[in-house]
Image (cartoon, rainbow, N blue to C red):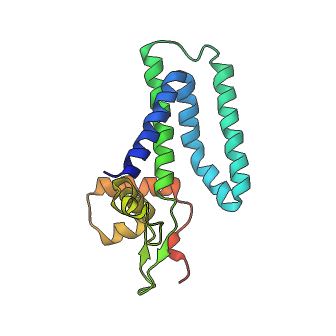
Amino acid sequence: MTVIDVALALTVATLAALGSQRRVGGLLVGLGGALALRPLLLLAEMNPWLGLVGALLVGLALALVGRLLLPGAGGSGLIARLAGGVGGAALGVAVMITLVTSMPVQRDTLNPNQLRYPPPDLPAAVRPAVERSMLVQLGREVLFAPLLASQDPRSPQRSAVTAALHSWVVTSEPWHLRP
């Protein structure tokens, strides 16, 4: 486990804690944000500024709907806090998976048919931590799920999970990049 893994795990934990504080409103915002991720990524692929504005508008709309529909923040019991924690954790996992699949993909200079992820030209201060990160390796599996499924006969359940995550957060096929 590297510093990158700890930072990503803290991101998930922080969003789960924030969702828990907002109770059922946190469930609404967390699940709504996780569900809006794919359309927002597609919008950002067309135009990053449009994607940013879309994300801000979706976040504002979710917050307002949560505030208007649940003026008392959805109750004060343990169940309401757990529901908010689940919503926050869902959003945290969505953010984490998006981050670990978003580094640039590079072609190997000696073999242009081979892709490198994470890229070897990361700054020297972070390269070892990124290369050893278990979560970045998970991101690599998610990013290249269609290619790895044909090459690596792992358990069908794991392949199904990585394929589902791939279809959720990966909006293009980086292996079709020109050499």
Q: How many marks?
A: 0
Vertically, is 49 above or below 18? below
Query: Residue at the location (65% across, 60% down)?
Result: 45
- The image quarter containing residue 128 is bottom left
Query: Residue at the location (55% across, 77% down)?
Result: 177
Vertically, is 1 above or below 149? above
| Left or right: residue 148 compared with residue 143 | left
Which residue is nearer to you in this view: 136 or 164? Answer: 136
Q: Position of residue 76 (x, y in %)?
A: 50, 12
Query: Residue at the location (67% across, 55% down)?
Result: 43
| Left or right: residue 86 compared with residue 34 | left
- The image quarter containing residue 132 is bottom left
Q: Position of residue 92 (x, y in %)?
A: 48, 40
Q: Position of residue 37 (x, y in %)?
A: 58, 47
Q: Position of residue 99 (x, y in %)?
A: 50, 53
Which residue is nearer to you in this view: 33 or 167? Answer: 33
Query: Residue at the location (51% across, 28% down)?
Result: 19
Vertically, is 70 above or below 35? above
Which residue is nearer to you in this view: 71 or 155? Answer: 71
